[in-house]
Image: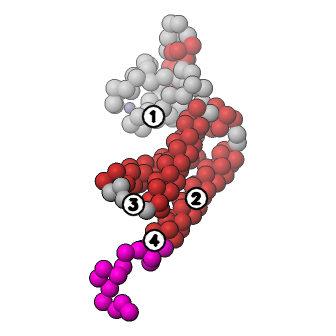
Amino acid sequence: MPHATTETLAQTEQTPDHSLFVRFVAGRDVGCPVCDYSIRDLTGPTCPECGCALELRVGSPHLRTGAWVFAIVSFALALGFDGVVSIMFTAMLVLNPTQRWEPIGMVTLFFLLAASMLAGVLLLVRRRTLWARRPLRQQWAIAIAIFLIVGLLHAAVGGVFVLTVGGAKAKGPAPSAGPSSS
Ligand SMILES: [Zn+2]
């Protein structure tokens, strides 16, 4: 996965010089990053097993993607859920305009949630460099905090939903077919 902060040697040097690559793999037990075939003592920048092009690059442990992907997935999963629920509620309101006010409140709430989750995804993508500057432990701490906050937020909204819809049902149009009425 190419990042803005890991420039490849081929990009920085006008004429790709493979001698550095050849010297690096000379006598070194290193596997092809694609197929894991040993490329020790390779004489050119192509894997003899899978045929993929190879290059030397400068990396950083700060750019390990685990925590960042975990944070993005937390926001993205919630965004998908909130998006689908928003659309369903909107369709419900459009198809049945004589609804009471509760669904309108829920639509607004889910649209706000979806917008916040989208903002979270965009923030993580656009501020990748700021994220990467933090130590790995801190990256994971933030990612786990994001996961928990998103989860708790949705649990709270779920609670509000149950209370409003449940409350609406309790005082809703029941007397039409109530077998145990009066
Ligand atoms: Zn390979």
Q: In percent of the image, x 53 and y 7: which residue is there?
A: 14
Real-space Cα distance between discs 1 and 2?
40 Å
Task: For the residues labelled 3 and 1, say whether their Cβ atoms are less than 8 Å apart.
Answer: no
Question: Real-space Cα distance between discs 4 and 3?
Answer: 11 Å
Determine which of the numbered discs, if any, sits on residue 33 in the image. Answer: 1
Q: Amino acid at mark 1?
A: Pro
Identify residue for label 3: 99
Q: Residue furthest top?
A: 15
Q: Position of residue 4 (x, y in %)?
A: 57, 25
In the rendered image, residue 57, in percent from the top left (x then y), is placed at 55, 24
Q: Amino acid at mark 4?
A: Ala
Left or right, residue 127 beside residue 79: right
Q: Are discs 4 and 3 less than 8 Å apart at CB? A: no
Q: Are marks 1 and 2 in contact (CB under 8 Å)?
A: no
Q: Which residue shows up at 45% across the image and 34% down it?
A: 33
What mark, if any, has residue 153 been given in the picture?
Answer: 2
First along the sequence among labels 3 and 1? 1
Q: Residue at x 48, y 32 (%)?
A: 1
User: Magenta includes 171?
Assistant: yes
Amino acid on which disc 2 is placed: Leu
Q: Which residue is mark 4?
A: 168
Element assignment for label 1: loop
